[in-house]
Image: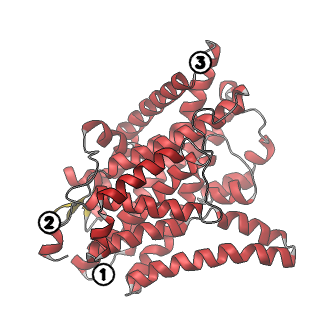
């Protein structure tokens, strides 16, 4: 980046360190949306309580995942651009090592916990689960290969406590090829647009192929591909490139009127049943991209999420996402024993338990791997910036 680019960026950059303000707060809100969505589903699952009584939109949890995807695409693409600018190349090996150190330890811990511990404890049993398929050798192998999305969406098999890790599978599968493409394709903006267009073409073409052929395998692939939202990560990456190159469109996307309109619209969406047919994920990915750009890079953002609470909750957001089903089940089962079903109490108790578990996990388990990432980073970001 040039000196002028750095001076006009909301990101804090010093030497080989990059820190985007407000991203931790956004990570927490993404996790919170997922928790709220699954809280409603688990209440119906365990208690037979009608879901979405207050939070009307059944896609609220999915929107939290989309926000995670856009955040991930934005940050990782930007860091790769910075690494290439500094070193004239991108270390694919180091990229993989960083992903392994951050994602794999907690992912595999929960896979092993679900398959070999929780399934044998009656308190943690789920009703209506096909035990034979859920805990089959095939399921275990696919989870160990980080293909949870194949199990959940392709085979429609729910494995308790880790089914939601399908999104981790999508990210890891996308990031197998992403650093390779970023390294060898020079026209980065065209690359991202190509990813988005290719994804959508396949998404809208597969149903017609399935109708013509009647192939079961095409049908399974279509279900997997429909949730394989790599275009949302590419949308995040596109915003990162626009920021990096200081495209003229940025000043229009910084508009307070535009951003406040998006915030108010999103708030209204969660208490409605609004859904855009066919392009719902992409539509919200663009809205999230505009907000991320404003909050992370605008010197005068519309909101300031930089405080100790949001910074902490964002720091443990991976744990919040991975552990929240366990926290919800503990909350629902424990409060059910006391006859407490109030939405607010259930939600606060679920969040509190999840935060507690995630905090213990972060400081007692995850942090040691995160600290190791610095050895394999040309550009430091996240927690490693503040060392």
- Name the residue nearer the viewer: 43 or 101: 43
| The N terminus lies in quadrant | bottom left
At 55% from the left and 79% from the top, the residue drawn is 197
Task: Look at discs 1 and 2 and give the one toward the viewer.
Answer: 2
* Residue 339 image label: none
Here the colouring is secondary structure
Q: Earlier in the sequence, mark 1 or mark 3?
A: 1
Residue 287 position by quadrant: bottom left
Residue 385 at x, y = what percent?
Answer: 22, 54
Q: Earlier in the sequence, mark 3 or mark 2?
A: 2
Residue 73 left/right relative to 207: left
Residue 353 at x, y = what percent?
Answer: 48, 28
Residue 192 position by quadrant: bottom left
Badges 3 and 2: C-beta atoms under 8 Å apart? no
**Image vertical order of residue 244 relative to residue 116, above or below:** below
* Residue 89 image label: 1
Residue 299 at x, y = what percent?
Answer: 19, 59
Q: CA distance from mark 1 to mark 3?
A: 54 Å
Secondary structure category for the residue under label 3: helix
Residue 318 left/right relative to 132: left
Q: Is residue 361 visible?
A: yes
Secondary structure category for the residue under label 1: loop
Q: CA distance from mark 3 to mark 2?
A: 51 Å
Task: Look at discs 1 and 3 and give the one toward the viewer.
Answer: 3
**Image vertical order of residue 158 relative to residue 7, above or below:** above
- Name the residue nearer the viewer: 325 or 276: 276
**Image vertical order of residue 25 relative to residue 285, above or below:** above
Residue 328 at x, y = what percent?
Answer: 57, 31
Reading the image, the residue beneath label 2 is: 15
Reading the image, the residue beneath label 3 is: 335
Looking at the image, which residue sits at the far top? 338
């Amino acid at each position: 980046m040039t000196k002028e680019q750095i001076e006009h960026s909301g990101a804090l950059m010093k030497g080989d360190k990059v820190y985007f303000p407000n991203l931790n707060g956004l990570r927490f809100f993404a996790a919170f949306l997922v928790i709220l969505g699954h809280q409603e589903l688990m209440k119906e699952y365990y208690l037979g309580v009608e879901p979405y009584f207050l939070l009307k939109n059944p896609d609220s949890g999915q929107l939290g995942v989309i926000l995670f995807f856009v955040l991930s695409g934005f940050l990782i693409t930007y860091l790769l651009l910075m690494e290439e600018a500094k070193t004239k190349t991108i270390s694919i090996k180091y990229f993989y090592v960083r992903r392994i150190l951050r994602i794999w330890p907690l992912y595999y811990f929960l896979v092993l916990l679900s398959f070999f511990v929780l399934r044998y404890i009656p308190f943690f049993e789920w009703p209506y689960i096909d035990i034979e398929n859920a805990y089959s050798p095939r399921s275990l192998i696919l989870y160990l290969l980080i293909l949870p999305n194949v199990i959940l969406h392709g085979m429609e098999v729910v494995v308790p406590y880790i089914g939601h890790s399908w999104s981790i599978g999508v990210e890891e599968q996308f990031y197998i090829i992403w650093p390779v493409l970023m390294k060898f394709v020079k026209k980065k903006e065209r690359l991202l647009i190509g990813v988005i267009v290719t994804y959508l073409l396949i998404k809208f073409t597969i149903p017609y192929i399935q109708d013509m052929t009647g192939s079961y395998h095409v049908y399974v692939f279509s279900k997997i591909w429909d949730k394989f939202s790599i275009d949302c990560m590419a949308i995040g990456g596109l915003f990162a490139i626009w920021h990096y190159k200081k495209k003229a469109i940025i000043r229009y996307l910084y508009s307070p009127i535009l951003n406040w309109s998006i915030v108010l619209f999103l708030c209204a969406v969660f208490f409605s049943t609004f859904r855009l047919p066919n392009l719902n994920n992409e539509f919200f990915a663009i809205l999230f991209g505009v907000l991320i750009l404003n909050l992370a890079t605008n010197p005068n953002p519309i909101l300031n999420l930089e405080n100790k609470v949001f910074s902490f909750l964002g720091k443990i957001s991976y744990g919040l996402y991975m552990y929240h089903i366990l926290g919800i089940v503990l909350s629902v089962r424990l409060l059910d024993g006391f006859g407490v079903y109030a939405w607010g109490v259930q939600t606060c108790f679920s969040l509190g338990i999840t935060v507690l578990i995630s905090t213990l996990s972060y400081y007692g388990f995850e942090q040691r791997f995160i600290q190791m990432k610095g050895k394999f980073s040309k550009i430091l970001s996240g927690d490693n910036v503040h060392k």
